Image (tube, rainbow, N blue to C red):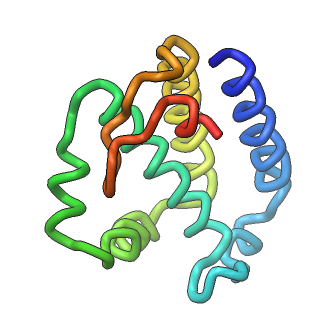
C-alpha cells in the first residue's frame, strides 16, 4: 500500500499546488463538469475523502444519508458546502486527505472498504 499511497499523495500535492495559487474569484471558474466550479470540485473531493475516513473507521452514516438522496447526493453535498470560503475548503481537504492517506497506508491491500454501490478493495480505493 505504501507505493500506491505515495502515488496518491503526489497527485494530491500536484492538485493542491495548482489550486493554492488561485485567487478567491478563480475558485468560482467553471470546470468541464457542467455547473461545477473549481471550488465545487475540490469540495467534492474533500467530502468524499472525509466519507472515506468515516467508512474506514466503521461509521456507515454516509451510506445511510446517500440512500435518502439517491443520485442527487453529490449535488446535495455541493449545495451544503457552497458557503465555505476557498481557504476553508483547502484546509478541510488537506486535513481529511492526510487522515485518509494515513489510514490507507496501514491497510491490508486486500481489505474491503464499504462504498456506495459495492465495497471496494483498499488497493483499488487508493488508485
Q: Which residue appears farthest toward the front when viewing the image?
A: 110
| Numbered circles on residues, count | 0
**Residue found 59% across the figure and 79% down from its top:** 36
Identify the residue at image location x=21%, y=72%.
69
**Position of residue 58 in the picture relative to residue 8 (left or right):** left
Q: Residue at x 48, y 16 (%)?
A: 107
Which image quadrant: the N terminus?
A: top right
Quarter occupied by residue 123: top right
Q: Return the x and y of residue 21 as percentages of the image width and height.
A: 85, 54
Instruction: Pick the quarter of the image with the C terminus.
Output: top right
Q: Position of residue 18 (x, y in %)?
A: 84, 53
Q: Is residue 39 above or below residue 8?
A: below
Query: Is residue 49 shown above or below 47?
Result: above
Residue at 55%, 60% in the rendered image: 85
Left or right: 29 as drawn, with respect to 123: right
Front-most of 27 and 74?
74
Residue 121, given in percent of the width and then of the height, sits at 46, 34
Q: Nearer the viewer, residue 22 or 10?
A: 10
In which quadrant of the rendered view does residue 9 lie? top right
119 is higher (above) or lower (below) than 19: above
What is the x, y in percent for residue 124?
56, 38
Q: Residue furthest bottom?
A: 34
In the visual, does 52 lie left or right of 20?
left
Amino acid at each position: 500500500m505504501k507505493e500506491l499511497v505515495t502515488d496518491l499523495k503526489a497527485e494530491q500535492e500536484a492538485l493542491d499546488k495548482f489550486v493554492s495559487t488561485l485567487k478567491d474569484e478563480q475558485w468560482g471558474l467553471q470546470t468541464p463538469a457542467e455547473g461545477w466550479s473549481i471550488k465545487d470540485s475540490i469540495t467534492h473531493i474533500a467530502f468524499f475523502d472525509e466519507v472515506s475516513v468515516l467508512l474506514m473507521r466503521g461509521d456507515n452514516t454516509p451510506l445511510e444519508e446517500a440512500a435518502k438522496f439517491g443520485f442527487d447526493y453529490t449535488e446535495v453535498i455541493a449545495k451544503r458546502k457552497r458557503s465555505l470560503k476557498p481557504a476553508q475548503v483547502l484546509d478541510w481537504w488537506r486535513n481529511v486527505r492526510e487522515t485518509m492517506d494515513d489510514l490507507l497506508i496501514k491497510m491490508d491491500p486486500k481489505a474491503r472498504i464499504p462504498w456506495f454501490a459495492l465495497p471496494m478493495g483498499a488497493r483499488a480505493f487508493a488508485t
